Image: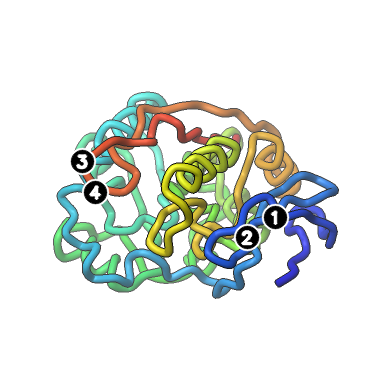
Amino acid sequence: MNRTCYLCSSAQNSVVFVENGIDIVQCSNCSHVFSTYEQEEHYEGYWDDDSSYDLGWWDNAHREIYQDFINKFLIAPSGKILDVGCGLGFFVKRIIDQKPNWEAIGYEISEKAVQFAKDKNGLKNVFSGIVQNSGIKKGSLDIITLWDVIEHIPKPHSLLEYLHSLLKPGGILFLQTPNFPIQLFKAKLKVMLKGMRTDGHYLEAKDHINDYTEKTMKMLAKQTGFQNCKFTILKPIASVSGSQGGSFGSFLKKFTIM
């Protein structure tokens, strides 16, 4: 299925990887990479599966990366932070526990995940719905985070433009997303060693609709009103898959947009 590029609207592209019948293509004009899989406009995703809620592993896997972020970015004695796509609320909870003078808010599209965050993590400032309908005051936030969210969104421009409007002058939008060149290398290596399997995790073509590089992330930032785009590497997730086995987390690059 053909799709025009969401960054430059070009219809010219070439296939760079095929994952179980789904083409992942690269725009011939701007080099942006995206999946041709047609996804729902608002991603419900992972948290609609109740089997994923055995979550000691999730909190453990993200403990160091969340702590690294808090140490590097929540330096001010107080502030206001919004976590978009907050899932089960572990990041929001960590901020509340460690930074009582910071106001931490979470927004999540999955009602089940929000219910877990409230019931199991005891969070009050986590809400279900589309963040654009949140009613958050413009220019009121110091930091906005999206942990492994942006790659799931088919049309990211309207979201990032809205989030830009919520930030104070000098505020930070932090995006964590896989670094595509590394992910492509890893996917090709898996296929070479084990062949293409229907249960294999390669480039997650049904979930990761847009795949970013430093170049295309800078393009998206500029198109949505952000003046600076910086890149940083935090401590790795203990395991991308959630198991306690070997991790590719150290290969993930975190994009920070300011």
Residue carrying label 2: 35
Answer whether labels 1 and 2 touch (C-beta < 8 Å): yes
Q: Secondary structure at mark 2?
A: strand
Residue under the image location 33 percent in, 25 percent down? 71
Q: Is residue 14 visible?
A: yes
Q: Amino acid at mark 1?
A: Val
Please name the residue that numbered disc 4 is placed on: 58
Q: Distance between the Cα atoms at labels 3 and 2?
A: 29 Å
Q: In what quadrant of the picture does the C terminus appear?
A: top right
Mark 3 or mark 2, earlier in chain: 2
The crowding category of the residue bearing disc 1, from other C-alpha atoms within 10 Å (few below 14, some 14 to 19, many at least 20), is: many
Cα–Cα span, label 2 and label 4 = 26 Å
Q: Which residue is mark 1?
A: 25
Q: Residue at x 38, y 36 (%)?
A: 248
Question: Mark 3 near mark 2, Cβ–Cβ under 8 Å?
Answer: no
Which residue is identified by label 3?
A: 244
**In front of the other: label 1 or label 4?**
1
Q: Please name the amino acid that badge 4 sits on.
A: Trp
Q: Position of residue 219 (x, y in %)?
A: 73, 42
